[in-house]
Amino acid sequence: MIKCIAIDDEPLALEQLVGYISRVPFLQLIASCQDAFGAMQVLSEEEIDLMFVDIHMPDLNGLDLVRSLVVKPLIVFTTAYPEYAVEGFKVDAVDYLLKPFEFQDLLKAADKARRQFEYHLQDYGGGAEPDLLERDGSLFVKSESRIIRINVADICYIEGMSEYVRIYTNMADKPVVTLLSMRKLEERLNVKIDMNIYSKAAIVKDLKNQKVLASKSPEERIYPASMTKIMTALVAIEEFEDLDKSIVIPVDFSLTGSASCLRST
């Protein structure tokens, strides 16, 4: 099944689109949204393979929504404005449906998306579920229209970025970026936060909702270096070309005035 989302700000057009999608046996409608921001929320929480999205919408149009996505699902644009067709295909849309369109038009576009979807999954041998699988300690993710195999043991860390994650490994210089929420990834890998941190106190927070995920001695206060030391370091960085050079300070040297009086030129 291809997991899809329908996006259109016109209620009647959205209702028709949802009805057409429900008649296609290989499509699974995950959500229908009346604006781009609602769609972005769904994309951050669900694994979406295909988007049916209207172009002309208030606040954030369909083209800008697609451009904003770091990892894009397959795209089928729906619009009443033919002048957007060229721009639609510039973002690698599978198809472009001009309103009003019939069920057969959507079925044809969906079939094109299905063929691309199956082509991207051919590395699985044609029978595996998409998005993410674990086999013999391996992780399979979709990235840049390809299926990538990652050895779980090679993962250094994973960075959650709203609707996608970056997976850093010791086998590549660049991270693998995939459309997947951190919550879903943790569920699939059965990952728990390791609080074996060298710091004597630490707090791990979800920056999106400010929820504390884990903590270690959170009530303990750790004070920064004194302001004098901080300002001295700043002056040294600004004034000395060679920071590796040793500096000998005379015994009778004294610093007059307060740190707040030190200024950079």
Image (spheres, rainbow, N blue to C red):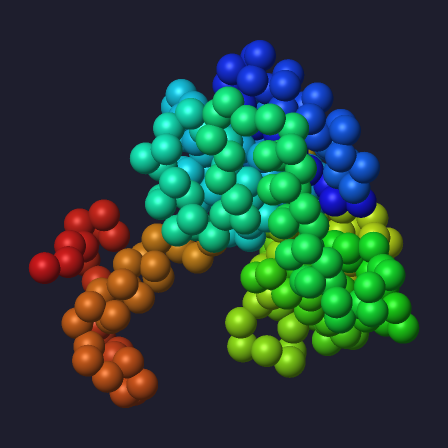
Q: Quadrant of residue 106?
A: top right
Residue 199 locus on image (x, y percent): 66, 60
Measuring 65% from the left and 73% from the top, which residue is drawn there? Answer: 169
Measuring 82% from the left and 64% from the top, which residue is drawn there? Answer: 126
Q: Quadrant of residue 165?
A: bottom right
Q: Looking at this view, is 154 or 75 the one in front?
A: 75
Residue 12 visible to an observer of this rendering: yes
Is residue 51 toward the left or the right of residue 97 in the image? right
Q: Quadrant of the C terminus?
A: bottom left
Q: Residue furthest top?
A: 12
Residue 23 locus on image (x, y percent): 77, 29
Is residue 246 toward the left or the right of residue 102 in the image? left
Measuring 73% from the left and 62% from the top, which residue is drawn there? Answer: 121
Q: Looking at this view, is 78 or 175 the one in front?
A: 78
Q: Is residue 195 above or below residue 150?
A: above
Q: Is residue 31 above or below residue 121?
A: above
